[in-house]
């Protein structure tokens, strides 16, 4: 089968690999349809991922069709499915608590083990969800949108509150869209006025703050000097995360959607006087995937506005490196692996 492999940082090539082995019980063989390109994939290509071993087949935003299923499976041959790429152990304390998204031994397709920039993969059937009425391209956007949907769910009920989403990249946009669906009055912040303009014009996210000097005073002015009930930082930038706490209203919540290697530092008096919560949000759960799929199916999320770049598996070895550097106008790129 074909596979797009990253042998080393900066080295991407399309190769032929042996066919996959026979299925074991409770596994399913999938013919890949479409794969979204994530910021993680660009980091892997550029050698910026701290925990990755090369060579690696990337790709964890996946739609596929069932090519083979084990005896007794409820899946049908040829059925379009969404893949949850978080392979959990099922035994650790997180899994026992119903939180496989933060499994102590988690393996993420395309990061810890080979992913879906190839013709076929084999995964546990429990990680495969029917795509229903979604198109193959729509189904490939579910995983990255589920990250934001999960973060919003972690923040708790909106109850008509105000939300600030910091970072207008794909994850931040998804978070803002699902915060709006949840009932928050959403303000989006980014260092790029161009990105904020795209969010306004494409998605109707009218309220915005340009990050940097003066952003806090502007945010306070927007909220009657009360702050935001929920603040989501989706920047993956420690400086931004360290600066997020003062935007939070008393009794509010700060959700870190992205992760960094650096220490996050805050003033304890500012934290305590708010009686606020600081929450980490990692990956997503099945309920989040299903919420995203339903939102796309209903028209609440328009994936055509999110997908800005397209390529095929044959061309991705040239296009992915180019998009890693030329990001102007890029929100989400998708690889069509099969027709």
Image (cartoon, helix red, strand yellow):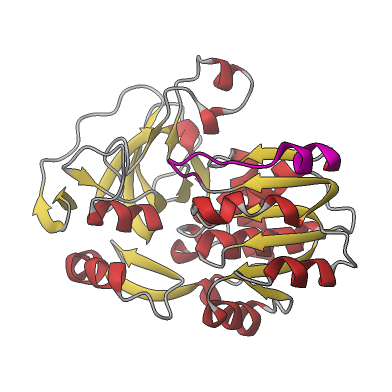
Question: Quadrant location of residue 176?
Answer: bottom right
Where does residue 116 sit, x and y in percent of width and height? 30, 49
Q: Compare residues 196 and 11 and report the one nearer the observer.
A: 196
- Asked if residue 83 is among those painted magenta in the image, a careful observer would answer no
Q: Compare residues 29 and 276 and report the one nearer the observer.
A: 276
Residue at 72% over, 79% down: 206
Which residues are the magenta region? 259-273
Above/below status of 26 relative to 48? above
Q: Compare residues 193 and 29 and report the one nearer the observer.
A: 193
**Is residue 59 something one can see in this rendering?**
yes
- Asked if residue 269 is among those painted magenta in the image, a careful observer would answer yes
Residue at 54% over, 72% down: 191
Where does residue 84 sit, x and y in percent of width and height? 47, 42
Q: Is residue 102 left or right of residue 179?
A: left
Where does residue 246 sit, x and y in percent of width and height? 74, 53
Q: Is residue 176 left or right of residue 85?
A: right
Question: Quadrant location of residue 231?
Answer: bottom right
**Is residue 78 something one can see in this rendering?**
no
Residue at 29% over, 42% down: 121
Q: Is residue 232 left or right of residue 221?
A: left
Q: Is residue 214 left or right of residue 142?
A: right
Where does residue 310 sit, x and y in percent of width and height? 35, 74
């Amino acid at each position: 089968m074909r596979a797009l492999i990253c042998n080393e940082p900066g080295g991407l090539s399309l190769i032929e690999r042996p066919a996959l082995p026979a299925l074991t019980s409770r596994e399913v063989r999938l013919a890949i349809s479409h794969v979204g390109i994530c910021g993680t994939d660009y980091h892997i290509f550029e050698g910026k991922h701290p925990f990755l071993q090369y060579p690696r087949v990337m790709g964890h935003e996946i739609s596929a069709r069932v090519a083979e299923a084990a005896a007794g499976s409820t899946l049908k041959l040829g059925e379009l499915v969404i893949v949850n790429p978080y392979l959990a152990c099922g035994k650790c304390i997180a899994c026992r608590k119903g939180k496989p998204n933060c499994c102590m031994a988690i393996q993420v397709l395309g990061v810890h083990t080979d992913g879906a920039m190839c013709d076929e993969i084999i995964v546990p059937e429990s990680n495969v969800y029917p795509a229903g009425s979604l198109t193959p391209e729509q189904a490939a956007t579910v995983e990255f949108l589920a990250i934001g949907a999960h973060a919003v769910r972690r923040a708790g009920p909106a109850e008509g509150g105000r939300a600030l989403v910091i970072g207008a990249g794909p994850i931040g946009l998804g978070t803002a869209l699902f915060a709006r669906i949840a009932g928050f009055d959403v303000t989006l912040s980014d260092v790029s006025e161009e990105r904020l303009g795209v969010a306004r014009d494409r998605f109707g996210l009218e309220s915005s703050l340009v990050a940097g000097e003066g952003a806090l005073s502007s945010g306070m002015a927007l909220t009657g000097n009360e702050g935001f009930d929920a603040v989501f930082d989706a920047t993956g930038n420690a400086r931004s995360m360290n600066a997020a706490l003062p935007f939070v209203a008393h009794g509010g919540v700060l959700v870190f959607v992205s992760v960094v290697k650096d220490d996050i530092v805050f003033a304890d008096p500012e934290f305590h006087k708010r009686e606020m919560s600081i929450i980490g949000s990692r990956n997503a759960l099945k309920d989040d995937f299903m919420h995203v799929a339903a939102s796309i199916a209903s028209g609440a999320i328009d994936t055509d506005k999110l997908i800005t770049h397209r390529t095929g598996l044959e061309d991705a070895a040239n296009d992915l490196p180019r998009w890693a550097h030329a990001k102007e106008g890029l929100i989400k790129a998708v690889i069509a692996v099969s027709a």
